[in-house]
Image: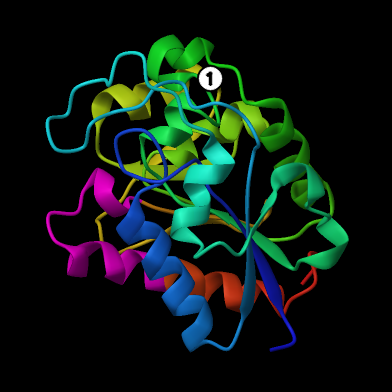
Amino acid sequence: MNRQVAVILAGCGVQDGSEIYETTLTLLRLDQLDISYRCFAPDIEQHHVVNHRSGEVAEGETRNVLTEAARLARGEISALAELSVDDCDAVIVPGGFGVAKNLSNFASAGADMVIQDEVREKVGEFHAAGKPIGLMCISPVMVPRLLGQGIAVTIGSDPGVSGAISAMGGLHRGCAVDDIVVDFSNRVVTTPAYMEAQRINDAAKGIFKLVDRMSELMELKPSD
């Protein structure tokens, strides 16, 4: 394994953290391609905690994003502040509502959202270095605020979210669950995943394709 990818997590669980299936499928495909990975998460409190059985907010309960994300990474995780762009060849951000609640405030602010400081800084460094960036599910909604306007992304076909992307100056492209959208000039790869998926196999097809394309981009210089 001579290539390494940073995976940025937002907690653990679709309703208030990173989507577990999307994260697992991402790590699986990286491993299948013999690409090593390191997981990171911001060391901050979650926006709120959701009881995943009832779907209701657990009033009075608090959890830490990094501590919860450690569940997904089997304890092998570092604070996002420790991520160095020099140590990794690419970065991937799985989806889940934690992206819209912990890594940003899109869930409450919509097109007026603000990106969490460390996320903006670290992913921005990958962009500045011309290293591939992969985002799936809801996470592509951050791109206009995270990387700048005019970058093509997809979240599938949801009119509300795609409209917010357009309102922020992004370029949304409709996409099937088993496909990807690639902005080659910015080296950004996106796929709908559970914005469209009804089954884990549906999500796997697009996620595997995203990781495969990022593997190809890692072998190319930005000017190629």
Residue 149 position by quadrant: top right
Quadrant in the picture for the N terminus: bottom right
Quadrant in the picture for the C terminus: bottom right
On the picture, is 88 further left or further right than 91?
Answer: right
Image position, residue 53 (x, y; %): 14, 38
Residue at (39% x, 73% y) in the render: 208
* The furthest residue to the right: 86
Residue at (59% x, 29% y) in the render: 144
Image position, residue 143 (x, y; %): 57, 36
Residue 2 position by quadrant: bottom right
The residue stretch that appears in magenta: 192-208
Compared with residue 169, is residue 52 higher up or lower down, i.e. above or below? below
State the residue in front, 222 or 37. Answer: 37
Magenta stretch holds residue 155: no
Q: Which residue is mark 1?
A: 168
Residue at (56% x, 61% y) in the render: 75
Q: Main secondary structure of the magenta part?
A: helix
Compared with residue 88, is residue 147 higher up or lower down, i.e. above or below? above
